[in-house]
Amino acid sequence: MNIRHLKNPFEDVTDLFVLSTRKTDYCIGIIYDEGYVGHIYYGKKLTGHNFSGLVRINEYPFGKAGKEREKCSFHDMVSLEYPSHGIGDYREDCLSVETPEGNSAVLPLYDSYEIIEGKPKIAGLPASFGDRNDVTTLILHCLDRILNLKVDLVYSVFYDNDVITRSVRITNGSNEQIFIKKVYSACLDMDNRNFEALSLHGSWARERHIEKSVLTHNKTIVESVRGESSHQDHPFLALITPNTTQETGEVYAMNFVYSGNFRTGAFLDQFDNVRMFMGINPVDFKWKLLPGECFEAPEVVMTYSSDGLGSMTRAFHDFYRQHLIRSPYLHKKRPVLINNWEATYFEFDTGKLLDIARRASELGIEMLVMDDGWFGKRNDDSCSLGDWTVNEDKIKGGLKALVDEVNRLGMKFGIWFEPEMISPDSDLYRKHPDWAIHIEGREGIRSRNQYVLDLSRQDVCDHVYEQVASILRSANIEYVKWDMNRQLTDIGSAYLDSDRIGELFHRYVLGMYSLQDRLIKEFPYLLLENCSGGGGRFDPGMLYYSPQIWCSDDTDAVERLSIQEGTALIYPLSCIGAHVSDCPNHAVGRTTPFETRGHVALAGTFGYELDITKISEEDVNMIPEQIDMYHRYNDLVREGDYYRMDSYLDNHTHDCYGVVAKDKNEALFTYVQVLGRVNYKGRRIYLKGLDSQKEYTVDDGETYTGDVLMNAGLLIPEMSGDFRSRLIHLEVKNG
Ligand code: DGJ
């Protein structure tokens, strides 16, 4: 049983719910007859189920909490599942409202429960899925009896994955409208174990670098108010015990299945207890709920590991591959593509593209992707977003002729769009200036010379969809790169009433999701790659629509080590967009060997992004070999278990990570010697994840048992120079 319910298990607790995964337990207790939804325990699986000592009501600092207790202090210390605003819990709360009278307090208390085999969908939002064999769902129906506000706390337990997902539904059961001003999706109260907070921070071209900080009474906040999950902060937070490594230490992690404004954080309260939370960012959020209406908050994915970060990583990877990513390409090799962005930027035409395609097809590249600049009159980033008609001055003879010719070369064809945007210099803007997100009378803030379309409007969504779909219907286009190159400002809408402007950020995200959903329904075999100025919207929400996301506009092999390490901390390698590009690298100006660029891109979807008609013959000659490598190893990279040995982020000298097949008969490790050293014979790497008893043959022909490779290590000879790399392939012969 994944979920057990016990009636009156111990004093003051009327109902106990135990949610079990293979290695963890999560316990919720309904406290007192009023029905406070208390948090009792989350962590390593327990054998007994007497948790009476864990219900924190008897630790009440101002005397024993009883019927006559002083409620304010009680609310401010008890461990809760979903603390609410205005009733004396002065720690961070999860829910706040505005009633017609202008009041903000709300107190949802337990009413009843429901257990469902399987998992209900969340309307209009991406969410994990599973059938009755994979997942069981507990819904705690709570009620604020004064406001007639129903609050459903939804917990879905994925036993085999060691994952519990959480979301919340708010229904207005009254006869009056009410505003939701804040609605988080998850909260976790627990004892402090000297936790550190681990988050992913970055910037454009430097996304998702791992950061750690000590948890104190000052709140650690990770958030986006930019309208997208963002390059800068990531909808992920883990609390880790001191000195947590890949194999040791406790980890509590939350990841948000949402692509807009989010807020997550953790802190110690006055009694040094920890509260961790995650949800939609309340900044600029205010949702009008009419009588009978329901608001569904996005999902949080939670996992706990008692054996370090590596287990957390593999739990997320498996969970997303099994229960979030839906694409028919999920378990398939993606075509090796060549994208013309870093090759030509805006300066291309049919002739140039075909030159690249001809050379590419000879080398074994399987798809040409035409990036930004093929539409309207776009020759730089100053115009034409919204005018999705082919620029026949560049694409001579039209799109179909180009696609057909690329197909004749034996290659597939892919195309770039930025559907959510509108250039002030576009026919669309001249016709519909009110379709941009804007504030009447205030000149819009331009970013990359563009505005954002108001996707809260159905008419705008319909128009955008038809523009994109008609291009896709016009030729044999098998891949779309869906880009988004600016963040939101000037939050105003010509369509929403003034008391609904607080809905715009969230409605924008819902509109964008609805567009992607329509697209993959009409074109089920389209390979969709999301992108946002590189990796500005790389989150679980987008993975529900596309099996891969462009990871970063920084394609430098060394920078990518850190970016890909942070990304792979949560997301499977199968979804990390990675290409070999030209040197000196366009983002950082660094020159790295072509071979190293290939090795680093292998830990992702793999492709090229450079002008192969111009690079050296030596580099060109390496391409067929790299493509061979991709075909040889991609099944393993896409489906295997990820292990990290060494991190360049920590040691500033070298990096090493690998993928081990589920049956442990094959493994591929990548070693990058970032900086060369004098007079060293090499570096010993202690491999991980192997079967200690199995005999592995390394590519040099030597055979070692797994325990030798993991405990005594494998010597990687020093290579002369910086930025050198080596792949280490291991195989159990006759395994
Ligand atoms: C940002 C993307 O990340 C790039 O790869 C490229 O598509 C440009 N936008 C095009 O404008």
Image (tube, helix red, strand yellow):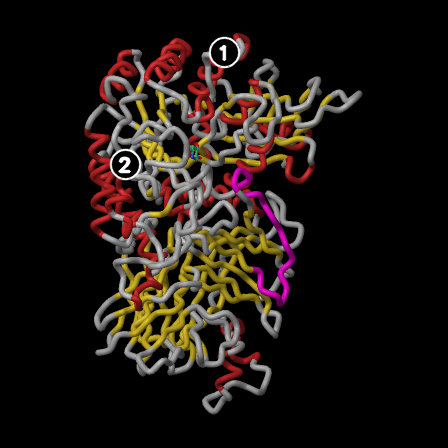
Q: Secondary structure at mark 1?
A: helix
Circle 2 Cα neighbour tier, 10 Å, few/some/many (<14 / 14–19 / ≥20): many
Task: Give the vertical position of 447 relative to 707 (above or below).
Answer: below
Task: Determine the quadrant in which ligand 1 lies.
Answer: top left
User: Which residue is labeled 1 in the image?
Assistant: 620
Quadrant (top left/top right/bottom left/bottom right) for the N terminus = bottom left
Q: Which residues are magenta?
A: 204-220
Q: Secondary structure at mark 2?
A: loop
Nearer the observer, 727 or 592: 592
Give the residue at the far bottom of this rendering: 68
Quarter-of-image position of residue 565? top right
Give the residue at the far right of this rendering: 679
Residue 352 coordinates in the image, percent (x, y): 38, 15
The structure residue drawn at horizontal position 32% and vertical position 67%, both measured from the top left corner, is: 152
The structure residue drawn at horizontal position 55% and vertical position 34%, both measured from the top left corner, is: 689
In the rendered structure, the answer to whether residue 371 lies left or right of residue 199 reads left
Quarter-of-image position of residue 441? bottom left
Task: Give the vertical position of 208 relative to 356 (above or below).
Answer: below
In the rendered structure, the answer to whether residue 114 lies left or right of residue 531 reads left
Asked if residue 134 shows in the view, the reply is no
Foreground mark, 2 or 1? Answer: 2
Residue 132 coordinates in the image, percent (x, y): 28, 51
Asked if residue 477 shows in the view, the reply is yes
Q: Amino acid at mark 1?
A: Val
Query: Does residue 49 belong to the magenta stretch?
Result: no
Residue 161 coordinates in the image, percent (x, y): 42, 47
Q: Amino acid at mark 2?
A: Asp
Residue 615 coordinates in the image, percent (x, y): 51, 13
User: Which residue is labeled 2 in the image?
Assistant: 387
